[in-house]
Amino acid sequence: MLLTKFTHSCVRLEKDGAVLVIDPGTFSEVEEALAGAGTVLVTHVHADHYDADRLVAALAASPELTVHAPRQVVEELAPRVADTDRLHAVEADGEFTAGPFTVRTYGGQHALIHPLIPTIENVGYVVDGAVFHPGDSFTVPQGLTVPTVLVPLHAPWSKMSEVIDFVIATRATRVHQIHDALLSETGFGVVEKQVSHFAGVYGTEYQHLDPRESLEIAPA
């Protein structure tokens, strides 16, 4: 399975001629990521993970495209989409297939930003048991070790110690960063030095991916 990282939290997975895209948000190269896609997974309703306008345009242009997302996202999209059967509401602790991909869902709630800001739904996705995209959450899939984990590297809702603890808890073979659009070159240097070091102490390889960089993900 080929994984391509785009800016921030958007990733594209390709397998057997099928394309699945996770979190095509406003910071990302949405049209490029969605080219030829059959499935979009959205972790939550925030715009940096879900560009409603461009996703609606993609649905109009591609009759085969389907979306799996928390109910809040589906409810926002439904009035703007002619065929709502292509929109599928998902919750944590579920499983479904999307073309050749098998998807399991985890989590349920966005990480706390501030006690005065209400929490929202957040669903993390494990694809083919091989790669985990947590969205905006540090929830670790229960009873499952996923070889490749995408780690939210920097966010208004997190601190570096939480990032490190999440990486350690996943016991992944390797991790790659997402949720990184707000970091400067200096910020990357500071955060990645520590995350990479502590990941290595616990036997996990940290590998930075630039936007549009691809790599093969081994089967689980």
Image (cartoon, grey):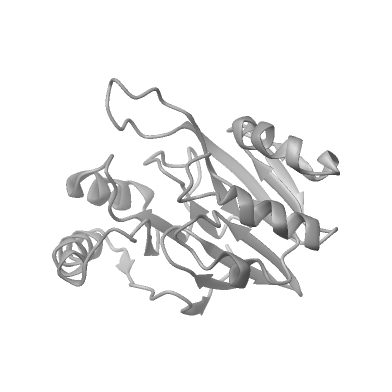
- Residue plotted at (53% across, 64% down): 11
Asked if residue 69 is positioned above or below residue 212 in the image, the reply reads above
Q: Does residue 99 appear in this view?
A: no
As drawn, is 213 to the left or to the right of 1? left
Left or right of residue 85: residue 78: left
State the residue at coordinates (78%, 44%): 81
> In which quadrant is the C terminus drawn?
bottom right
Residue 160, position as x, y percentages in the image: 19, 50
Please indicate whether residue 103 sits to the left or right of residue 108 in the image. right
Q: How many marks do you count on the picture? A: 0
Give the percent coordinates (x, y) of residue 180: 33, 60
**Is there any visible trace of residue 122 in the rendered image?**
yes
Q: Which quarter of the figure is the N terminus placed in?
A: bottom right
Q: Quadrant of residue 195?
A: bottom left
Q: Where 157 falls versus 197 (above or below)? A: above
Image-quadrant location for residue 31: bottom right
Pick the residue in front: 102 or 208. 208
User: Image point 41% across, 43% down: which residue?
Assistant: 136
Residue 30 at what x, y percent from top left?
57, 64
Residue lying at 73% horizontally and 44% vertically, measured from the top left: 96
